[in-house]
Image (tube, helix red, strand yellow):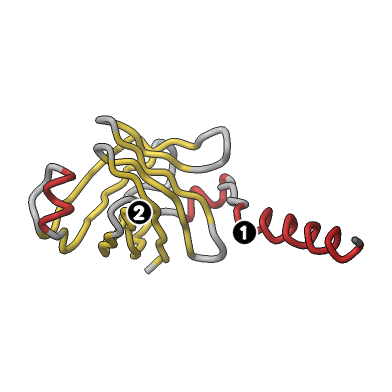
Amino acid sequence: MKKIIVLVAVFLMVSSVAFAQGRFSDTDISNLKGTWSGTLTFTEINVSVKCDLEIINNIIPLYGKLLVYDIPDRLANQMGVMTGTNLFENPSGYLTNKGTVMWAGNNSFFEIWPFGSGRVQGWFYFRSLKGDLDFRKK
């Protein structure tokens, strides 16, 4: 019985660390400016694409440009965009009450949080497609 209790306690501790997301501080916001490279993974259709997130300024609202490379036909059709490379811009990134940064508009959003040094993770919803993202600062 003690082994089961210990196993449950360990599982809960590991789970809380694995699913905890960081919070951006004022200093973190000023350090977001620059180019971040990584992937968007459209989880429902199991497609990943490479992209760059460029954050133009270092104060709220954050101006973000997302350059998505090599969008395949199947994904482009569902997104309503052209195949190949597409640029998405949003000048209104804001700090949420959870300490994350979010860009929202046109029935879409893109949310990031810190995940270690020089790395952000997050999730997005774009025209009924949702997924996860992982970026590292260039």
Query: How packed is label 2: few (under 14 Cα within 10 Å), some, or many (20 or more)?
Result: few
- Residue 87 placement, left or right of 100: left
Give the percent coordinates (x, y) of residue 59: 44, 42
Identify residue type, mark 2: Thr
Residue position marked by numbered label 2 in the rendering: 43
Q: Single out the residue that lies furthest toward the left.
A: 82
Residue nearest the viewer, comparing 37 with 6: 6
Query: How packed is label 1: few (under 14 Cα within 10 Å), some, or many (20 or more)?
Result: few
- Quadrant (top left, top right, bottom left, bottom right) of the N terminus: bottom right
Residue nearest the viewer, comparing 21 with 23: 21
For marks 1 and 2, give the one nearer the viewer: 2
Confirm or deny contact between disc 1 and disc 2 (CB under 8 A). Answer: no
Residue position marked by numbered label 1 in the rendering: 18
* Residue beneath the point at 11% across and 47% down: 77
Q: Single out the residue that lies furthest toward the right.
A: 2
Q: Which mark is residue 136?
A: none
- Quadrant (top left, top right, bottom left, bottom right) of the C terminus: bottom left
- Residue 137 placement, left or right of 54: right
Q: Looking at the image, is mark 1 or mark 2 earlier in the sequence?
A: 1
* Residue beneath the point at 85% across and 58% down: 5
Q: Single out the residue that lies furthest toward the front.
A: 1
Q: Quadrant of residue 72?
A: bottom left
Q: Quadrant of residue 7?
A: bottom right
Give the percent coordinates (x, y) of residue 90: 28, 39
| Spatial CA span between label 1 and label 2 | 18 Å
- SS at circle 1: helix
The mark total stands at 2
Identify residue type, mark 1: Ala
* Residue beneath the point at 42% across and 44% down: 111
- SS at circle 2: loop
* Residue beneath the point at 18% across and 53% down: 75
Give the percent coordinates (x, y) of residue 99: 56, 41
